[in-house]
Amino acid sequence: MNDEGYARAFGRAYSLLMSLQKDEDFEVDEKQARRFGEIVEFFSKTANKLGGTVVPVRLVPHTQRGDLEAFFEVFSLNGQDKVEEFCRVIKHASAFGIEPTADGKVCISLTVPNVFRRK
């Protein structure tokens, strides 16, 4: 099987697995939810200060994670305390990305795992 065939087969299997899981079978993991909340708070405050935006947070229990995207024209961390806070909150993420957008902004995306757990 070539790479494309493998990716298609994996995608079908993942879609089937996700379709079998129900949101009501999951509950919030308080420790991870607090960590996700710290990330949301940090990026919301930073976006307010720098004129950025945080898109609505995505919480889908059966995926067991929390996702956040923040958009900035300029992203700046002034002072050692801001850099330290940034480093502290992104340690909670299992995925972190910085990408340019077509409209000249920067998108910072984070995923926090296990915000939900099976009941």
Image (cartoon, rainbow, N blue to C red):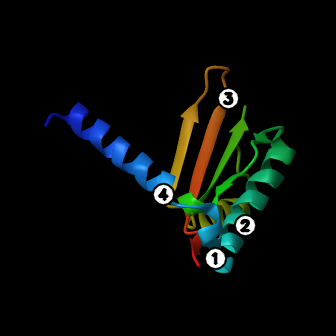
Question: Where residue 19 appears, x then y in whole percent?
Answer: 50, 51
SS of the residue at dot 2?
A: helix
Question: From the viewer's perspective, is the residue at label 3 or at label 1 nearer?
Answer: 1
| Residue placed under numbered mark 4 in the picture | 20
Looking at the figure, which quarter contains the C terminus? bottom right
SS of the residue at dot 1?
A: loop
SS of the residue at dot 3?
A: loop
Question: From the viewer's perspective, is the residue at label 1 or at label 2 nearer?
Answer: 1
| Residue placed under numbered mark 3 in the picture | 105
| Residue placed under numbered mark 1 in the picture | 29
| Residue placed under numbered mark 2 in the picture | 38
Which is more toward the observer, 103 or 118? 118
Question: Where residue 51 appears, x then y in whole percent?
Answer: 84, 38
- Labels 2 & 4 near each other (Cβ < 8 A): no
Which is more toward the observer, 58 or 94? 58
C-alpha span from label 3 to label 2? 23 Å
Question: From the viewer's perspective, is the residue at label 4 or at label 1 nearer?
Answer: 4
Seen at 62% across and 62% down, the residue is 23
Q: Give the side of residue 98 with respect to residue 34, left or right.
A: left
C-alpha span from label 3 to label 4? 38 Å
Q: Is residue 80 above or below residue 57?
A: below
Q: Which amino acid, by three-letter code, is at mark 1?
A: Asp
Question: Where residue 3 appears, x then y in whole percent?
Answer: 21, 35
Mark 4 or mark 1, earlier in chain: 4
Seen at 30% across and 36% down, the residue is 8
